[in-house]
Image: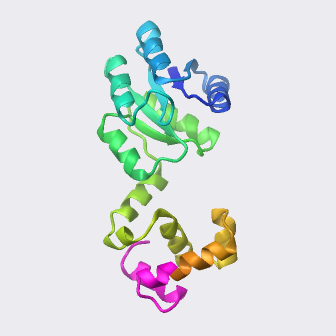
Amino acid sequence: MHILLADDHDMVRETISAYLESEGGAEVALAIDLAGALQSIRQDGPFDLVLLDFQMPGMNGLTGLIQAISANKGGRVAILSGSAPAKTAREALEAGAIGFIPKTMGAQSLLNAVRFMSSGEVYMPVELMREEEATDHPLAEKLSPRELEVLESLCKGLSNKEIARELDLQEVTIKLHVRTLCRKLDAKNRTQAALTAKEAGLF
């Protein structure tokens, strides 16, 4: 596999490239911004796969993605992101990306996804697909992304303490979210809020 990895974070760039080379047998070229990526594509491309950090300098949203796809002779270009929501992932795919890779993904899963995309298959993590389905729900439109996370945890039967640990938040913050959820869902308590979400098919 002939891959170009463009990311402005040294540790991310070095860690991912080292793993792709050692475990995936890939040949990886590196860039730190969009300008460098486009130059590398012109000089050494087209690549089997181009991985672009969504937040790096020069990207300007999906504009950088479209430029890279054009430069790579319409070839495979995927987005790397540490925090972009499902909506952004879907927009990237609609703009022509071959896939969307969260930086939180495990090393072996990332390698599998890279191989998958290099063979021409579109990749999007199941978690993001589920998130997108949830946010398309009428009930979800009332809630913030964090409130949706808390509500999903309530549906799993988790306590405030367990939710706080899972989301890396203070327990008092979770209590406030639960109170807000009950108000927005017109529920008397956390159990009723969870039942409302389940009956509506949100989770």
Image location (x, y in percent) of residue 126:
46, 53
Relative to 182, residue 142 above or below: above
Q: Closest to the observer: 202 or 27?
A: 202
Q: Is residue 136 visible?
A: yes
Q: Check the image and report above or below for 91 versus 26.
A: below
Colouring: rainbow
Where residue 34 appears, as percent x and y from the top left, is: 46, 23
| Magenta residue check for 181 | yes
> Can residue 156 be spotted in the picture?
no
Q: Chief secondary structure of the magenta span?
A: helix
Magenta region: which residues? 180-203
Q: Which quadrant of the figure contains the C terminus?
A: bottom left
Taking the view exactly as shown, the residue that stands out farthest to the bottom is 188
Tell me how many marks there are: 0
Q: Say which of 86 and 118 sits in front.
A: 86
Residue 177 position within the rendered picture, expressed as x and y whole percent measured from the top left? 55, 75
* Above or below, 131 relative to 37: below
- Taking 27 as reference, is 187 left or right? left
x 45%, y 40%: residue: 100
Taking depth in this image into account, of 188 and 43 the one nearest to the observer is 188
The residue under the point 65% across, 27% down is 10
Side (left or right) of 69 relative to 53: left
The structure residue drawn at horizontal position 34% and vertical position 24%, both measured from the top left corner, is: 67
Q: Residue furthest top?
A: 43
Residue 6 percent location from the top left of the image: 53, 25
Q: Is residue 172 magenta?
A: no
